[in-house]
Amino acid sequence: MLEYLRIRNLALIEDMELDFSPGMNVLTGETGAGKSFVLKALGFLLGDKLSAEMVRPGAERAQVEALFTLDGQDMVLRRELLAESGRSRFYVNDALRSQESLRELRARLVTHTSQHDQQMLLQPAFQARLMEGVFPRPELLAERDALLAQLQQVSAQRKALSEKQASLADRRDLLEMQQQEIDKVSPEEGEEEHLEELRARARSLAHQRKNYEDALLLLHGEDGPGLLDMLGQFERLIHSMSREDDTLTPEADAVAALRQQLAHLGNRLRRPPLPDEEMDMDDVEERLFALAQLKRRLRRTLPEILALRGEIEENLSFLDACSLDMSRLAKEETALAERLSAVVGRIRPMRRAAATDFAHALESQLRDLGFSEQVRVIPDFMPHELWPGVTDDRARILWAPNPGQPPQPLDRIASGGELSRFLLALTSVRQDAESAIYIFDEVDAGVGGLTLNKLAEKLNALAEQRQMLLITHWPQLAARARKHFHIRKVVHGDATFTLCAPLDGPARHAELARMAGGGPQGEAVARSLES
């Protein structure tokens, strides 16, 4: 049950509060006053989308809040719409919840019937879903849907395998040729970098050995005296000079020490550095050339070639094993199709029986709503290939509202008033959640005269079972409400507001008279309805 609804800063509504009662609650007012928008706000609270433009100008956010009683417990729902981003936030008992959580709640809280639902009623797909909704074994429908989903998945796998097989089969010669090219060279991961490093080290070592040789030539000379010979001559001369000039003795000793140090260095230069490992540079260069040729032929880097080798091996293995996988999937598909056929075979007669009972219940409700005693509702079943080789039924509704008429689809012969009553009859027999509130948005459209009284009696009977929110332009319906709200639009300055007020006593009498046309005739109708 909906106890309380508050709407703030939504479109023309600045701040509106409604306290509802059990039974029938009616919203009335002039066309365009904003009656349906109250229901739109409730729909937004329960998951419908609204754009940021619906936030009242000047406000940061719009907010809709309601107090429901569900299973004996109070539950406060609140949803906010942000003007800046158009995003919304949903709260249950002040705890932030996801929009997904609204789906289950909505079905338990409201059953909404509007002129939009009338148009949906004309669609064969919607009629088929109605027939599914009255099926007595929903677990069979769930099993059917699950099997169909598995079949679609297996079929998609087979199609993907077949397409890949066809694509690779066309490329098999190329793949095998590429594999032979790669196997001929047999590159290894990191091999090219290792060979480049060996070549760089060999070049560095050769350069060092050349330097050692050049240094030895400088020390010992080649065609003439070397540095050591000249330094020996210089040493003998400076020693001779120091015997006559003892101040040169330290320098003579330094020259002798230098000659000895250079002689020691010469011994070291005769042992140039050796490679860490025996390297055949011809082999290295030959291997690097082979790798370069492979890269040029395949137009890939070495890491890409190594990846290609793995891809080729995988693809060739796939081609070899594909026939086995295709055979396995074909058997799996056949088995699933057989199971689906068996389930559908159980569903079809049960669906036809349930649809017939449903049609009879609809006929009874339609008679209560002023249709002929001979009104007929006929479920029409058309074969529908659910899967190749598996035929199911797709149901639609035919009806004959008057004697002598052949059964026809609803969209062929149903007027707006007939659709309104048909929808009401449908609501009466559908198996919705027992706690759901009936919401009727102008379900009386196109109805008048004596038929209107039948409609009022049916709505009144439904309101005895559950709480109801009803938008109507008919005083005959509004007069039966336990609580009557009047919606009106007013202008203050340059701003427009939608207001709502509960009516009682003289105010309610005045509204009923207005709805009846006003004047003495309207007054008379209002008094007759209140008596």
Image: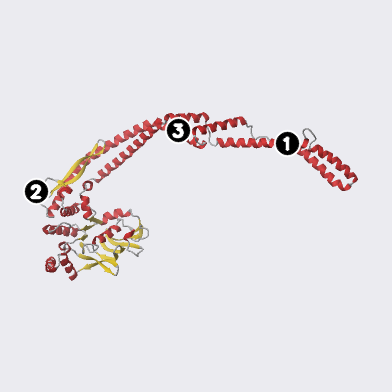
* Badge 3 or badge 2: first in the primary sequence: 3
Residue at figure coordinates x 86%, y 46% from the top left: 249
- Residue 501 horizontal/vertical position (percent): 24, 67
List x then y, in percent, for residue 423.
18, 53
Label whose residue precedes the other's in the sequence (2 or 1): 1
The answer to whether mark 2 and mark 1 are in CB contact below 8 A is no
Q: Which mark is residue 214?
A: 1
Q: Amino acid at mark 3?
A: Ile
Q: Is residue 285 left or right of residue 417?
A: right
State the residue position of label 3: 312
Provide residue 75's location: percent of width, then percent of height. Answer: 30, 60
Res 452 visible: yes
Residue for badge 2: 403
Q: CA distance from mark 3 to mark 2?
A: 75 Å
| Kind of residue sitting beneath label 1 | Asp
Note whether 14 is above or below 128 in the view shown. below
CA gap, disc 2 to disc 1? Answer: 124 Å
Residue farthest front in this picture = 494
Quadrant position of residue 316: top left
Residue located 39% across and 33% down the image: 167
Between discs 3 and 1, the one toward the N terminus: 1
Tag 2: amino acid: Pro
Residue 442 image-quadrant placement: bottom left
